Amino acid sequence: MKNKQTAANLILLLVAAIWGGGFIAGKMALTGLSPAAIIAYRYGMGALMCGIIFWKRVAKTSKDVMKKGILIGALQAAGQAVQLIGLQYTSSANQSFLCSAYVAFVPFISWVMIGKRPKIKSFVAGATALAGIGFISLKESFTIGIGDSLSVLFAVIFGIQIVLIGKLVDKDSDIAGLTFFQMLTAALAGFAVCIVQGGLTLDIGKEAIIGVVYLGVLNTFVAFMAQNYAQKYAKDTTAALIMSMESLFGFLLSVLYYKEVITVKFLAGSALCFAAVLMNTIEKGRKSG
């Protein structure tokens, strides 16, 4: 079991790296597609690949696993929409750290959903994360932009998803079937919104194509299959800690690719956010995962 936990932790680190690149891919995709179209194409590609490669397992998916996949997929679509709309109004570097605040929210979400009261350090971590968000997002007028606000809302939604997966997915759940219906649900939600908005378009630029293919193949199919598998063996807090490294990957890649200007205020805020992540997930005297 310990070897499986170690392997699961390494898989989650890979997921974090892929997701870190997703902030840039999202910006690229938004140059030619609406958030709903990105969701439709991204999860449509993921569902198609999953259905082709694992069609025998998908065909045998139980109703219970199917329902779980649909529930997680609906939440995934909602969260992705909020994140992409937010990314239209903020930088990928900002969003990478604001989204990492979900780690500080997980214990409180678990409290609401499962009834497990957070430890004192979780309250301290939550306050630290809020201070970090303030440094990153608050303007001189003490207001927060819509892009940063939506990024924080996404952190809450993703925290709910983390707890939900940990609660619903057990070691007997078929990951292929679960992931297929998760992605299919998200794709159908995106397509439905696109139809209301006037339909999908295929006339997009090269940058948008590269972005949406990265999101569809790596961020969706590869990462979600890996995440759902790894979370069968990794502890919830360990999974949250490792996947929060996404913010570091996203920050570094954003600076390298977009040459974004980093201020002392931003660095202070990102340091506080990351400190909150570490504070909330590392336990003294115990081996995690």
Image (cartoon, grey):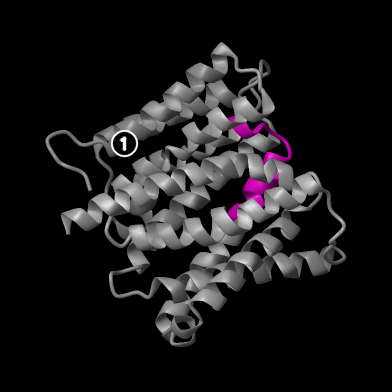
From the image, tell me which residue sits under label 1. 280
Is 213 drawn above or below residue 103 in the view shown?
Answer: below
Location of the N terminus by quadrant is: bottom left
| Residue extending furthest toward the top | 264
Would you identify the image quadrant in which residue 225 lies? Answer: bottom left
Horizontal side of residue 226 vs 81, given as left or right: left
| Residue extending furthest toward the left | 285
Q: At 53% from the left edge and 62% from the top edge, which residue is drawn?
A: 221
Front residue (pair 128, 90): 90
Give the prevailing secondary structure in the magenta stretch: helix
Count numbered badges in the picture: 1
Is 55 drawn above or below residue 33 in the view shown?
Answer: below
Q: Residues within 10 Å of mark 1 (few under 14, many from 20)?
A: many
Q: Mark 1: which secondary structure?
A: helix
Front residue (pair 212, 64): 212
Range of residues picked out in magenta? 79-93
Q: Position of residue 83 (x, y in %)?
A: 62, 47
Q: Does the segment drawn in magenta span residue 248?
A: no
Q: Is residue 126 visible?
A: yes
Horizontal side of residue 166 vs 251, given as left or right: left
Q: Amino acid at mark 1?
A: Asn
Q: Position of residue 254 (x, y in %)?
A: 61, 30
Is 57 drawn above or below residue 246 in the view shown?
Answer: below
Q: Is residue 108 visible?
A: no
